[in-house]
Image (spheres, helix red, strand yellow):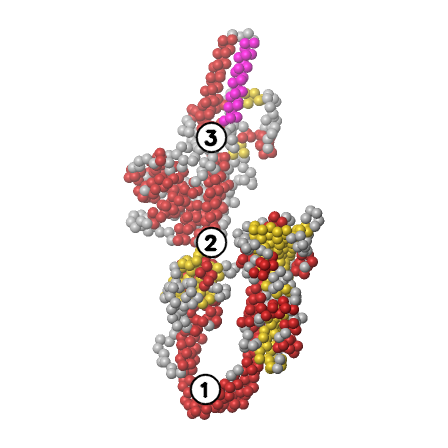
Amino acid sequence: MPQAPRTVRAWPVRLVIAGIAVAAMTIVAVALITLSWYGSRAILLDMAAMAARDTGQIVAERARRIIEPGSISLRMLAFDPIVDAKRLDDRLARRSVLAAELTENPLVSAIHVGYENGDFLLMRPLDRRDVREQFQAPPQANYLVQSVTLGDDGKRHGLFLFYDARNELVLRRPQPDYQFDPRERPWYIGAMDTVSTVTSRPYVFFSTRQVGITLSRLSHSGRAVTAVDMALEDLGEALGSLRMTPNAELALVDEDGAVIAYRDMNALLEHRRALGESDVGTLQTLGVGALTRLWQVAAADGQVVSYEAGGRKWIGVSLPFDGIDGVSMRLLSAAPVDELLGVLALNRARMILISIGLIVLFLPFGWQAGSAVGRALEGIAAQALRMSRFNFRRRKERAASMLREVESLNSVMDKVAGSMESLLEISRVLGSEPRIETMLAQVLEKFVQATRCEGGAVYLFDRERSHLARVAIFGEQGGLPDAMSAHQGEAALAGGPGRNQDQGRGLGQDPMRPHIAFALRGRDSQPLGLLVLVLGADQDRDHAAPAFQAFADRLTGMLAVAIETRKLIEAQRNLFESVTHILADAIDAKSPYTGGHCERVPKLAILLADRMQAETLGPYADFHLNEDEREAFRLAAWLHDCGKVTSAEHIMDKATKLEVVYNRIHEIRTRFEVLWRDAEIDCLQARLRGEDPDAAEARRAARQAQLREDFGFVAECNVGGEFLPDGAVERLRAIGAQTWLRHFDDTLGLDAQESARLAGSRPVPPALPATEQLLADQPHHIVPWDDARRPAVERDDPRNTWGFDMTLPRHRRNMGELHNLSIQRGTLTDEDRFAINDHIVQTLIMLKRLPWPSHLERVPDIAANHHERMDGKGYPRRLHGRQLGTTERIMALVDVFEALTAADRPYKPPKTLSESLGIMASMCRGGHLDPELYRYFVRSGVWLDYARTFMRPEQIDAVDVEALACAAQPEESS
C-alpha cells in the first residue's frame, strides 16, 4: 500500500515571529560583540572593492560615451563622397560635413582621411588656445584643414587652410615641410586588414599633446581610410570626481604600466612636460608611490590588497578596464586605511555598547511586539492571497496598524493593487482605442494613477515645425506649457536617454511642482514625443528612486509602441491615399481631354454625401457614414475610373469617326485629290483627242464641284455632331462606290500584325494598277479577337469569375471607313464603345485583387458600380437598383453630372446647368438614375456649389428646381 503523505506541523505566524524576535535579539547581541571587528574589516574591504568597481563601470561608460559618437561619425564618413574624391577641391567641398561632425561631437579632436596614393586630409577645430598658438591661426578662424597631396611633379605638397564658422576660407598657407604619408601610420595599416572599426592604443597626439586614441575604418570603396582622434582627458576628470577619500589615488594604465588617465590630469601633463616626454608616461615617471606599489603587488583577479607605501598603510585594487574595445587596460584604485576608517572605529565601539543596552532594555517587549507583527502579517497574507487569485481590488475598509512597517506593507499592497488595476486599464485602452488623441488622454489618466503622481501631460513631436505640442493633460498641470521647442524637450531629457528629473526648469513655471520627463521613442530610437509627470510638492522619494524610473520607463515603452503603431497606420493610410490620388492624376494626365475628371467626381461625391449626412428630415434622415464607411467611400470615389489606365488613349479621346491613332480624313482627302487630278487629266486628254474644249472643261468643272461637295459631306459626317439619318448613310455609300487607281504595292511598310491581316483577307494581291473604292470597308480593317485578348465578360464564359454580364462585340476593332463614317450618333463604334466600357471591368478586377482590410472591402463595388442602372440594364454586371447601396447610387449620379457639365471633352460642347439637369431627369425616367436621389440632389443645391467652383460662367444659367424634380418621375409610375 502506498505510504500516506507526511503531515508537517504548521506554527502560527504570531508565535513564530515572537519566538524569532526574542531569539534574534539574543543572537544579535552576541554577534555584535563577537564579530564587530571582523565585520568592520569585511565592510571596509567590500566598500573599497565596490567603490573601485563602481568607479571602473562609471569610467568605462564614460569612455564608451566618448568613443560612441566618434564611431557613429566614422561609419557615416566611410560612405561619404570625400573618400572617393581625387582632387583637393572635391575633398574641400565636403568640409561642411566634417565641420558638422566636429560640432556635434566636441570630444572628437580631429577627423582625417588617408588615401591609397598617400594623399592626406585632416580637419580639426581651433577651440583650444594652445592649438591655435601652435598653428598660428588667424583670430577669425574656427577650423583648420591640413592637406598633403601628390602633385603632377611626383612631390608631396603640404597645405594649411583656415576656415571660419560659416566654412568660408580665411587663410591659405602652403606648408612645404608638412610631409606626411598616412599609409605608414598604424591607424591606416590596421584599418586596411578589416571592414570594421579599428581602435589604436592610447598615445600622445602630436599637435595638441593630449592623450587619446584614434578610431579608423576602411571606406566603402576600399580606396581610403577615415579616422577620428578622440581625447581621453574626460576620463581623467571622471577619476578626479570619483575618489573615495580626499587623498585617494586613481589611475588608468595600459598593460605596460603607461598612464592613460590620472585623477589630476593637469599634474600629469605638467609632469610630462617637465620630463620632456613626447609619449605616454609610466607610473614610475608619474612618481605616485601608492600607485607604483599597487601595480607591483596587485592581484590580477581584482582582489583587494593591503600594503604600505610612503610610510602609510593603503588598501588598493587593480581591475580590468574594458571601456575601450581592443585596448587592454587596468584601473588602479588606492585609498589610505586611516581615511577609510575615519570615525568608523569610534562609531563601531559606540554602537556595540548601545546595542547591548537596548537588547537588555527591550527584551521583555519582544514577545508582545512579535505577536503584534504576526497578527498584522496575517492580514497582509490574506490580501496577498486575494491578489494571487487575480483580485487586485483594494480593501475598502482596513484598520490602521500601529506598526509603521506593517502599515507600510499594507500601503504598498494597496498601491500595488491600484497600479495593477491602472495597468490593466492601460492595456485595455491601448488595445481598443483607435484614435490617438482619445487613447493618449485615457492612458495618461491611468498612467498618472499607476505612478501615483499628481498630474501629467503628453507632448508629441511635430517634425514640420520642430516643436513639441501638448496633446493630452490630466490632473495638476504644474505650469506645463501648451507647447515647447525641441530645445526645451532636449533640455528636459539632458540627463540621459529616456528620463530626467526636470525639477521645474525649462518645462513648468511652478517651482513647487517638480516634474519628471520621459522620452517616447520608437523602435528605431527616433523621438516620438515626451511624457511629463507632475510630482507632489514634497517630491516623494519613491519617484526619485531608479526602480520607479525603470518602471515608468517601461510603461512609456508601451505607450511609445502604441503611438508608433497608430502613427504607422496613419502613415500607411496617408500613403495609400496619396497613391490613390497619384493614380487618379495619372489617369487624368493620360488624356488632356479628360483631365480633372478623376478629381472632380470624388469632390462632388463627398460634397453630396456630407450634405446628406447633415439631414435630420426627409428620405435621407437615417443616412450616415461612420469613419470607416466614409474612408471607403472616399477611396472608391478617387478610384472609380482606375481601370482607364488600360484604356487606349486614342479611343478615349476619339474626336472624329475616322480617328484611329490619327484622323484618317487626311488619307481620304488625298484620294479626293487624286480624283481631282484625274478630272484635270481627263479634260486635257479630251482636248488632245480633238473634242470641244469648252465641253471638256465644263465636264471637268462639274466633276470637281461634285468632288468638293462630296468631300465636304464626308468631312461633315466625320465630325459626328448631330444624329446621322439613314439617307446620309446611303449617300456615304454612294460616294464611297467611286473608284480610283492605286499604282503602289499596299503590302509594303506594314507591321507584322497588319501584314498578317492583309494576307489573311486577300491571299492573292490584285495586279497593279488596282482599282480601289473611294470609301471602303476592307477585310483587313477588322481586327478579330484572339484567345489572349478576348475578355471574359460574357455571362456564360467559364473564365468569368467576377459576375460580368456584358455583350462582347463581334470584333475587337473595326476600322472600316464606311463602318465608322456611318455611326449615327457620336464618334464611337460598338467596338470603341466596348473598349471604353471595358475600363470599368478592369477597375473591378484591379480593385478586387487588392487585399483590402475588412472596413474597406466594399471599395471595389462602390467604385465599379457607377455605370449600373436602376433598371438593371447597366454594365458591367447588370445589377438592379435594389442591389445598389446609397453610396453606389451617389457615384452613378455625380459621374453623369460631371460628364455632362465637363468642358474638356473633344467630342461634345459643354452643357449648361439646366441642360445637364434636364438630361439627368430624362435618365431618371428611363430607369438609369435613382429618381429620389436626383430630386434630393436638385433641391439641395449641391450642383450650384459645384458649378461655382468647377464650371465656366457661361454654363451657369437659370434652373427651375421644382420642374426638374417633378420631371424625374419614372415612366412606369407617372
Q: Which residue is mark 1?
A: 17
- Residue 589 visible in the snapshot: yes
Position of residue 846 relative to residue 68, above or below, is: above
| Whole-percent x, y for residue 307 in the image | 62, 81
Queried whether the magenta region covers residue 143, the answer comes back as: no
Q: State the mark number for residue 390.
A: none
Marks 3 and 1, how far apart at CA: 106 Å
Q: Residue at x 63, y 48 (%)?
A: 87
Q: Does dot 3 land on a helix, a strand or a loop? A: loop
Q: Quadrant of the N terminus?
A: bottom right
Q: Does dot 1 land on a helix, a strand or a loop? A: helix
The answer to which of 958 and 541 lies nearer the viewer is 541
Mark positioned earlier in the residue sequence (1 or 2): 1
Q: Which residue is mark 2?
A: 571
Report the number of numbered marks.
3
Marks 1 and 2, how far apart at CA: 61 Å
Q: State the mark number for residue 656.
A: 3
Mark positioned earlier in the residue sequence (3 or 2): 2
Q: Amino acid at mark 1?
A: Ile
Magenta stretch, main secondary structure, is helix
The magenta stretch is 665-688
